[in-house]
């Protein structure tokens, strides 16, 4: 039988999932908008794809600052406001001009706002409510991103075909403002606000983490896996339509990627409450590398959808692993700050990956050779993950035991 506190915790996790669902939509749908926007303004794919890179890089640069703020003042003061700004920014894309400065400024603002309503923010909030079922609670929150990727790309493609890409951006932003913001404002809160004692210990824990091999190993692993998955994801629709797959079917492949992502997160959340999280992470990265290799030779809708689903499964599960291990290795007092630093690596990789893929296509007319290289990079990350402490007992810390019930 659930206690009132645990019931409240699951309510917070579900509301956080809604926030992640809305905040993830522009990342998942960018691939659908890439070709229409590039054709409208006569931009190269590298130029059009670089806006995603700008958005990801700005999010990365803002993540450590916002993470520190979250650890000091709590998520309820930051998350709803950040989600509102992100939604309004997406709506404003309906008035986008062909000036590149306009393009990049809008995506810069969206990127900075999004990090305030990203898993960096919600992970801290959710972790304060859970200890024994933390993996599953994290999976519920992160499942919002998977659902976002399943529903928004085909919806965006449908809107683009019927109303144009400008109106499609406006509608997506409107969903965030009218659905996500009210729910997050009402339900997302921490079990207890950060105390003066907690705030005083943020920096000592941070310094300890920065001198830890475990932290830097997680940084390298997340950078490598994000470089591959985000780079390919942004160019997925363009890659498949270049090979003769119809645009509507290519959007379905993005949904399959997200469905795999969702499944991977839910399954991994269950696994890491029972098995060594680092070992689970290594297996997921190996699966992702194999799927990327298959995708490099995918010239049909069927092969593409299978490869994308498996790649999404591995990548989605991996996003459960990183914050979970941060909480277990270093506790909760600095979890948002540390996760923010990790997002500096994630965002940097997300910025570089699409540009590398776009440059490879513009120079050679093909993505294939770089995709094979990225598969190798991902497999190397899997081997590196095996060097982390693996047992559940090894990863527990006094700090993590003291903050959640």
Image (spheres, helix red, strand yellow):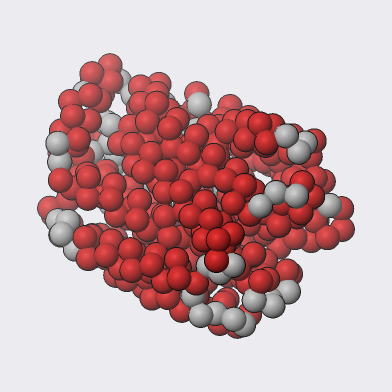
Q: Residue at x 22, y 65 (%)?
A: 383
Q: Quadrant where the C terminus lies?
A: top left
In x, y percent, where is residue 394?
Answer: 12, 53
Is residue 391 shown left or right of residue 71? left
Is 40 above or below relative to 82?
below
Q: Against 86, is 198 above or below?
A: above
Instruction: Give x and y (percent) for residue 183.
Output: 61, 38
Front-lying residue, 197 or 22? 22
Residue 213 seen in render: yes
Q: Percent from the top left, x then y, of residue 67? A: 38, 30
Question: Splitting the image into 4 quarters, where does residue 139 fall?
Answer: bottom left
Judged left or right of residue 73, residue 24 is right
Q: Which of the pair 112/362 is nearer the observer?
A: 362
Q: Is residue 400 above or below residue 390?
A: above
Task: Quadrant for residue 147, please give it.
Answer: bottom right
The mark total stands at 0
| Camera-side residue of 249 and 313 | 249
Is 101 displayed left or right of 229 in the figure?
Answer: right
Left or right, residue 291 beside residue 305: left
Say which residue appears at 45% left-offset and 30% top-offset.
62
Answer whether residue 70 is visible to the viewer in this image: no
What is the residue that sits farthest to the front in this orientation? 363
Q: Residue at x 23, y 24 (%)?
A: 203
Q: Residue at x 50, y 23 (%)?
A: 77
Q: Check the picture and name the quadrant holding the N terminus.
A: bottom left
Residue 146 coordinates in the image, percent (x, y): 54, 58
Outermost residue, right direction?
A: 162
């Amino acid at each position: 039988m659930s206690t009132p506190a645990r019931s409240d915790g699951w309510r917070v996790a579900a509301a956080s999932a809604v926030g992640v669902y809305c905040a993830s939509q522009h990342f998942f749908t960018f691939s659908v908008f890439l070709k229409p926007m590039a054709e409208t303004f006569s931009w190269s794919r590298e130029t059009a794809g670089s806006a995603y890179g700008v958005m990801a890089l700005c999010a990365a640069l803002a993540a450590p600052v916002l993470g520190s703020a979250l650890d000091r003042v709590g998520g309820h003061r930051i998350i709803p406001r950040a989600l509102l700004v992100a939604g309004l920014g997406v709506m404003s894309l309906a008035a986008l001009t062909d000036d590149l400065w306009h393009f990049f400024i809008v995506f810069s603002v969206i990127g900075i706002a999004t990090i305030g309503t990203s898993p960096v923010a919600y992970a801290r909030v959710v972790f304060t409510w859970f200890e024994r079922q933390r993996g599953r609670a994290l999976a519920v929150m992160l499942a919002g991103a998977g659902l976002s990727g399943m529903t928004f790309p085909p919806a965006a493609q449908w809107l683009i075909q019927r109303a144009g890409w400008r109106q499609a951006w406006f509608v997506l932003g409107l969903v965030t403002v009218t659905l996500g913001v009210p729910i997050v404002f009402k339900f997302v809160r921490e079990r207890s606000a950060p105390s003066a004692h907690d705030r005083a210990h943020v920096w000592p824990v941070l310094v300890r983490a920065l001198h830890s091999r475990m932290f830097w190993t997680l940084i390298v692993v997340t950078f490598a896996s994000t470089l591959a998955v985000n780079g390919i994801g942004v160019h997925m629709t363009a890659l498949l339509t270049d090979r003769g797959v119809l645009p509507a079917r290519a959007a379905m492949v993005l949904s399959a990627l997200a469905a795999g992502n969702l499944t991977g997160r839910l399954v991994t959340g269950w696994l890491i409450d029972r098995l060594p999280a680092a070992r689970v992470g290594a297996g997921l990265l190996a699966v992702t590398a194999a799927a990327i290799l298959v995708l490099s030779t995918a010239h049909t809708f069927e092969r593409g959808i299978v490869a994308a689903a498996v790649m999404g499964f591995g990548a989605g599960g991996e996003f459960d692993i990183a914050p979970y291990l941060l909480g277990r290795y270093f506790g909760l007092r600095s979890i948002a700050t540390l996760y923010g630093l990790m997002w500096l690596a994630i965002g940097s990789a997300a910025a570089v990956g699409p540009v590398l893929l776009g440059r490879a296509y513009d120079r050679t007319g093909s993505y294939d050779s770089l995709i094979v290289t990225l598969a190798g990079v991902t497999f190397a990350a899997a081997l590196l993950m095996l060097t982390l402490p693996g047992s559940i007992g090894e990863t527990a810390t006094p700090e993590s035991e003291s903050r959640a019930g």
